[in-house]
């Protein structure tokens, strides 16, 4: 069957190759007279800066990445990057002359995607597969938010038509630049082109390294300006956080990182809900968020302008209350002209009508966000647009509409090294026909249906403190364009009652006891009518009941503490069916999920912690999973052992090493243990940074051998921390198995390490 499908696919590919031959990329003309005239008239930068601004937006955008600060190995990883990669770039030329200090390794496979493009386009391969581009509509927008995926054709054309910074034939490559405004020096900017990568072995190694570490969640490839909004949210571990337009998830991942950075508890009190209107983009976001292995997140699929009002159970009083958020991010759909440098297609499609079309949607998203924000909470509004109609006009209109219930926060003392411009106090409105208007009174009657009063500045802009808005313009720090406004809610909104009541029907709907569901039992009958949602709806989550029949054997086998609440475990199959995977979520996420089962279109939540792995000689049918081990490690006291560095390297480079290949102490512990899943712990001490961090690996103890269930890229990460080149180590392991000598080995001889998930027990373990 597989052979037939492959043959059919080959025929289709051959047909398209003949009928639609590939054409060479056309050079992108980075000019648009309407764009230039519009923003020159608006005065978004001073006249003395205009030429610098225009020259900058015509250059490709440098790539950027940040190290995940909530990971215990962040400092060690940053030291590794600086010493093994960055230090090589100070003396290596773009012609590809190898420096004498360069590490001797096997050359990685050539890529046709530039480093800059690959880094700034998060999970580009996944986006290509699904077929989603930056032009995908989000809440009715023309262009998606700032961290969306650019058009690959346009980006490739840009690389061919305009030389990126650092792309010179004879000069030295520019070393990476630390973004000083990002905390702890964990964010860096790169300025290399595709030509540089192809001609220089060091850059290819760096590119391969960043892709690998990004997949394992230790690094996030993200546009520099996109990192700013989460930094201004002032996130604490107890906060309830909502990201209203979250896909593709780079900012959401950053928010989750900050939620965990403020607490040593792997399941803190707070949580993050990421929402997006586009179902496909929600699933792309799942991949982005899953890298962080957090049990404190939930992804939902709703129109941000009509997000349902949620409820939760107050643990102190036991009553059901409205769920209001401490922090809200409104990264609203926008025209996206701040992304010109990474998405050159905008040069061709830009027009003044885009902002007018989006203004209403942006107001509605912001209004709904403020309704869901708790008093005393903070909302960050952002766009990747230069246009004041999408920025200051929206903020000014909402401040006046809220009649003193919100105000702009002065963030001038935050991120002191970030260069920013103040919010604009005056601007004009231009229609798609080219007509200019300075006030609403000048607008003809036949155009007032779509040119609205809220688009214009008013005389009280000074009293509204519009200058507290932040504009990031490209030529100030070699970035993209961005707008940020930080709002604080000081009282209830005028159209909200002081105490928001939950309607009886909503409460009953949330508490309804459905067959196999996990909602709290109530004496009341469930309502006969429930809200219906359009589009695809995922299967529900089923949390463990207190008397779950599978839990006693799992608890006994792994010696879980009594303090661990096993009702936080959940599955996605009905009672009576075999549970392939078991997930865990935090107590707060469980609270929200149980109270709003009929209100929310869930896409994903929780992290996989147990996978079915049956064997006739094993007392437990489940093994621990690498994804969720950090969430439950503190509760597991059985089936665990401390191992040494040599064991880590042996287990990660061999598929099923026999006990005899391990250190004596580890051999002894293995022989004392019965067959089944286990967790191994290695305390890594880094002499370079003076830090230590625990490394956890889940695995399977067979009859005479042991196997670890660690994903490919996480294996690479751990080996790097141990001072081992993962590519060379894995190749050397294959040599030993196949009996080959050095010159005979090729990359084709190396199979990928086993991926985490449900797998059959191998012959070596039987």
Image (tube, rainbow, N blue to C red):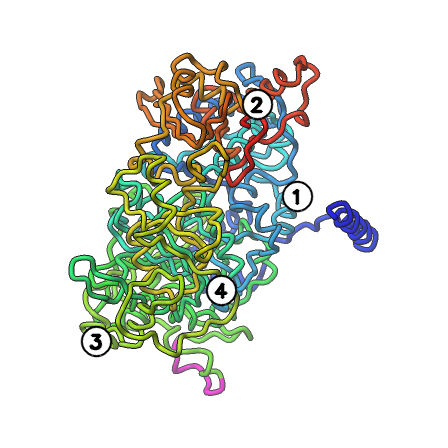
Residue 510, image x, y percentages: 32, 68
Q: CA distance from mark 2 to mark 1?
A: 36 Å
Identified at 36% across, 68% down, the residue is 394
Residue 563 located within the stretch drawn in magenta: no
- Judging by the rendered image, the residue that carries numbered circle 3 is 497
Residue 237, placed above or below residue 716: below
**Mark 2 or 4, nearer chain start:** 4
Residue 176, image x, y percentages: 46, 32
Q: Answer whether labels 3 and 1 touch (C-beta < 8 Å).
A: no
- Judging by the rendered image, the residue that carries numbered circle 2 is 730
Which SS class for mark 4?
loop
Which SS class for mark 3?
loop
In the image shown, does 312 or 546 lie closer to the viewer?
546
Q: CA distance from mark 4 to mark 3?
A: 33 Å
Residue 64, image x, y percentages: 47, 40
**Residue 38 appears in the rendering:** no
- Judging by the rendered image, the residue that carries numbered circle 4 is 537
**Mark 2 or 1, nearer chain start:** 1
Quadrant assignment for the C terminus: top right
> Which residue, as the protein is rendered here, is positioned at the far front?
616
Q: Which mark's residue is nearer the viewer, 2 or 4? A: 4
Q: Which mark's residue is nearer the viewer, 4 or 1? A: 4
Residue 484, placed above or below residue 104: below
Please state the extent of the stretch shown in magenta in the rendering.
439-446
Q: Which mark's residue is nearer the viewer, 2 or 1? A: 2
Residue 146, placed above or below residue 527: above
Which SS class for mark 1?
helix
């Amino acid at each position: 069957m597989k052979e037939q499908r492959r043959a059919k696919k080959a025929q289709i590919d051959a047909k398209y190759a003949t009928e639609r031959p590939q054409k060479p990329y056309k050079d992108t003309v980075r000019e648009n007279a309407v764009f230039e005239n519009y923003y020159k008239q608006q005065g978004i930068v001073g006249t003395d800066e205009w030429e610098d601004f225009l020259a900058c937006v015509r250059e490709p955008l440098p790539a950027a990445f940040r190290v995940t600060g909530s990971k215990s190995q962040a400092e060690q990883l940053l030291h590794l990057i600086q010493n093994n990669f960055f230090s090589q770039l100070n003396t290596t030329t773009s012609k590809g002359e190898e420096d004498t200090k360069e590490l001797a390794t096997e050359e990685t496979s050539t890529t046709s995607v530039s480093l800059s493009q690959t880094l700034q386009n998060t999970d580009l391969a996944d986006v290509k597969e699904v077929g989603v581009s930056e032009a995908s509509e989000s809440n009715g927008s023309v262009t998606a938010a700032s961290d969306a995926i650019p058009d690959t054709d346009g980006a490739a054309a840009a690389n061919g038509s305009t030389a990126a910074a650092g792309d010179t034939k004879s000069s030295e490559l520019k070393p990476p630049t630390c973004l000083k405004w990002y905390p702890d020096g964990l964010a860096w900017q790169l300025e290399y082109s595709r030509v540089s990568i192809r001609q220089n072995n060091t850059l290819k190694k760096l590119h391969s390294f960043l892709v690998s570490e990004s997949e394992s969640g230790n690094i996030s490839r993200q546009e520099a300006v996109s990192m700013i909004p989460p930094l201004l949210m002032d996130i604490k571990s107890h906060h309830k956080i909502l990201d209203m337009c979250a896909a593709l998830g780079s900012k959401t991942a950053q928010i989750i990182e900050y939620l965990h950075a403020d607490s040593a508890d792997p399941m803190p009190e707070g949580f993050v809900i990421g929402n997006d209107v586009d179902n496909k983009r929600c699933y792309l976001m799942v991949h982005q968020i899953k890298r962080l292995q957090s049990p404190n997140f939930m992804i939902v699929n709703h129109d941000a302008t009509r997000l349902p009002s949620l409820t939760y159970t107050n643990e102190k009083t036991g009553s059901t209350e409205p769920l209001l958020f401490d922090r809200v991010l409104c990264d609203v759909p926008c025209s996206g002209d701040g992304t010109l440098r990474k998405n050159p297609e905008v040069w061709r499609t830009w027009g003044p009508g885009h902002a007018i079309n989006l203004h209403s949607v942006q107001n509605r998203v912001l209004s709904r966000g403020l309704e869901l924000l708790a008093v005393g909470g903070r909302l960050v509004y952002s766009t990747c647009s230069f246009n004041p109609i999408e920025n200051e006009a929206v903020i000014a209109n909402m401040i006046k509409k809220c009649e003193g219930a919100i105000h702009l926060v002065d963030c001038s003392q935050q991120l002191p090294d970030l260069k920013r411009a103040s919010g604009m106090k005056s601007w004009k409105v231009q229609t798609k026909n080219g007509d200019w208007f300075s006030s609403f009174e000048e607008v003809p009657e036949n155009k007032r249906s779509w040119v609205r009063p809220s688009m214009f500045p008013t005389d009280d802009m000074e009293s509204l403190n519009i200058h507290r808005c932040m504009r990031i313009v490209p030529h100030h720090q070699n970035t993209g364009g961005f707008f940020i406004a930080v709002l604080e809610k000081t009282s209830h909104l005028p159209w909200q009652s002081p105490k928001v009541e939950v309607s009886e029907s909503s409460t009953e709907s949330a508490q309804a006891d459905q067959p196999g569901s996990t909602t709290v039992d109530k004496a009341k009958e469930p309502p006969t009518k429930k809200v219906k949602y359009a589009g695809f709806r995922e299967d529900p989550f089923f949390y463990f009941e207190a008397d779950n029949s599978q839990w006693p054997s799992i608890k006994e086998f792994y010696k879980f503490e009594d303090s661990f609440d096993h009702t936080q475990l959940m599955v996605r199959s009905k009672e009576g069916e075999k549970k392939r995977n078991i997930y865990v979520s935090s107590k707060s996420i469980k609270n929200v999920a149980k109270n709003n089962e009929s209100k929310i279109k869930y896409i994903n939540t929780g992290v996989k912690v147990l996978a079915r792995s049956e064997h006739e000689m094993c007392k437990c049918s489940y093994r621990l999973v690498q994804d969720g081990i950090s969430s439950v490690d503190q509760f597991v006291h059985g089936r665990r052992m401390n191992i040494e560095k040599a064991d880590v390297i042996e287990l990660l480079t061999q598929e099923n090493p026999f006990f005899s290949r391990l250190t004596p102490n580890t051999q002894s512990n293995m022989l004392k243990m019965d067959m089944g899943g286990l967790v191994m712990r290695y305390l890594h001490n880094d002499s370079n940074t003076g830090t230590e961090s625990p490394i956890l690996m889940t695995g399977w103890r067979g009859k005479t051998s042991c196997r670890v269930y660690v994903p490919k890229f996480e294996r690479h990460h751990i080996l790097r921390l141990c001072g081992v080149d993962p590519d060379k180590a894995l190749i050397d392991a294959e040599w030993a198995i196949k009996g080959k000598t050095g010159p005979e080995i090729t990359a084709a001889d190396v199979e990928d390490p086993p991926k985490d998930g449900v797998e059959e027990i191998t012959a070596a373990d039987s």
